[in-house]
Amino acid sequence: MIVGAGPTGLTAAALLGRYGVECLVLERWESVYPQPRAVHLDDEVHRILGRLGLAGRFAAISWPCHGLRLLDPDLRVLAEFRRAPDGGRHGHPQASMFDQPELEQLLRAGLGPGILRGGTEVTGISQDEAGARVEVTDRATGARETIHADYVLGCDGANSLTRTAIGAATADLKFDQRWLVVDVATPADLGEWEGVHQVCDPRRAATYMRIGKTRYRWEFRLLPGETGAGFDDMGRLHPLIAPWTKDVPAGDLEIVRVAEYTFRARVADRWRDRRVFLLGDAAHLTPPFIGQGMGAGLRDALNLAWKLAGVLDGTLPERTLDTYETERKPHARAMIRRAMLIGKAMTEGGRVGDLIRRVVAPRLSGRAFASETPALHRSDLVVRPRLRRNAAGRLCPNALFDDGRRFDDVVDGRFAVVTATVPAEPERAAIRDRGAVLVTTRCSAELRRWLRSGAAVVRPDGTVLCAGTSLSRLCRFLPRP
């Protein structure tokens, strides 16, 4: 059972469906919410859409982004973090801009009949050793019923009823700012650098980005006493966006949406209670400055879906589900910290703000804000040495094979053993017996560069479980079917 049909819930349902797990998605609204919200995802998250067969269709509705610039109040560049718009190590643009309603329509279209049930209000969740019970009310008729499920995934947003039902609280990471969010459509090309512009100004911090052929977004920090309603017509809004629109007539600028948001940084203290899990905004809230809020929810869905499928079909022990929070919570917190750093660089006043803007920001390494995100923490499914780093916990690249396929196409959501040498027949048989795919680096120049020697066991979500030189030892970490 999945509560909530936003991007996280829809992705979780689609991934579970690919593993043959029956699920029902409950959503209080009948159709997709029409207003734009999230607008960015990186190549790691684009790769998740590729697993659902949606990469090409998403590319058709998205706009490659060239990276991130930090600007001073006069729009001069303080620091620049570039992203490859023509495809990185995962085969997709390292940053893409999009319209969330269009993405949700893609995700909904990929679900089978009867999986999504709109107009349904979830009013209560309880559980015992036999399973979970979800109390629902039909919003049209008022009819009530109880639905039984093996597990419940709470993808129901920042005001999550699921989180309340399991008694989880959220830790406030001390970031709380009111911002104006503006979406504008125009046939005019504004001629700006094709990336995200973050204006670092403690008086009026701002963000500009192009999100489509004719669509642009601005975000401005609201001053005390200001509200979003004060900028709901072009006459009052135009002075804010004029540094980018320049000589484009105001009549050629159509307001799509003006909204006030409070940007927050929070993490739930626990993400699981027995058969109930929290995903997406129900588990964490990320300020939008590095565009990782929605992507974090899709990462949650990918991390949990294959584990849940393995537990349900008996190939993985039930304790495997504990690794979900162990792995995802520190990763989400790390991405929130990155977003908060950019937010402070944009808005902090006084000597601290000047230090961040003039000294710290320009010296941040490109890696700090590259599209590659941090390695997952150690768990039963991330076997990392304690005294040195290796590939464990990081994503295996979605490498291009010599025959034109990519790694994810070949592996198809299964465990894989990637090796620089051809193993002997007993080892090949052991890999087959455990239901894993054998991949030798001789089939891909990209894999050869990534894994110069030794071997690695790659999980169904593309994360490296373990790596080393002894193939026979590594294969012991493969689950038995």
Image (cartoon, rainbow, N blue to C red):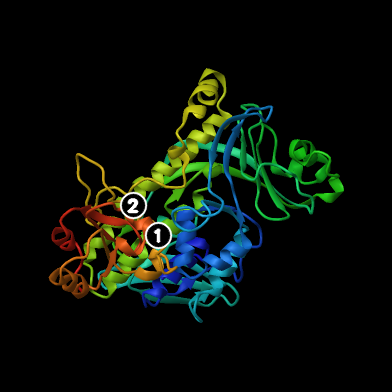
Question: Along the line of sight, which residue is nearer the eye, 228 or 347?
Answer: 347
Q: Which mark is residue 399?
A: 1
In percent of width and height, residue 391 lies at 29, 49
Judge from the rendering whether residue 191 lies leftward or rightward of residue 152; answer left or right.
right
In percent of width and height, residue 127 lies at 32, 67
Read off the residue under disc 2: 450
Q: Looking at this rendering, what residue extends furthest in the top direction? A: 351
Q: Looking at the image, which residue is at 49% across and 45% down?
A: 286
Q: Is there any visible trace of residue 160 in the rendered image?
A: no
Question: Along the line of sight, which residue is nearer the eye, 331 or 247?
Answer: 247
In percent of width and height, residue 379 lies at 24, 52
Q: Looking at the image, which residue is at 13% across and 71% down?
A: 426
| Label 2 CA crowd tier, 10 Å (few <14, some 14–19, many 20+) | some
Mark 1 residue type = Ala
Question: Along the line of sight, which residue is nearer the eye, 369 or 295?
Answer: 369
In percent of width and height, residue 471 lies at 17, 60
Q: Quadrant of residue 71?
A: top right
Mark 2 residue type = Trp
Q: Say if mark 1 contacts mark 2, CB within 8 Å.
A: yes
Q: Is there any visible trace of residue 54 in the rendered image?
A: yes
Question: Along the line of sight, which residue is nearer the eye, 92 or 272?
Answer: 92
Label 1 residue SS: loop
Q: CA distance from mark 1 to mark 2?
A: 9 Å
The N terminus: image quadrant = bottom left
The C terminus: image quadrant = bottom left
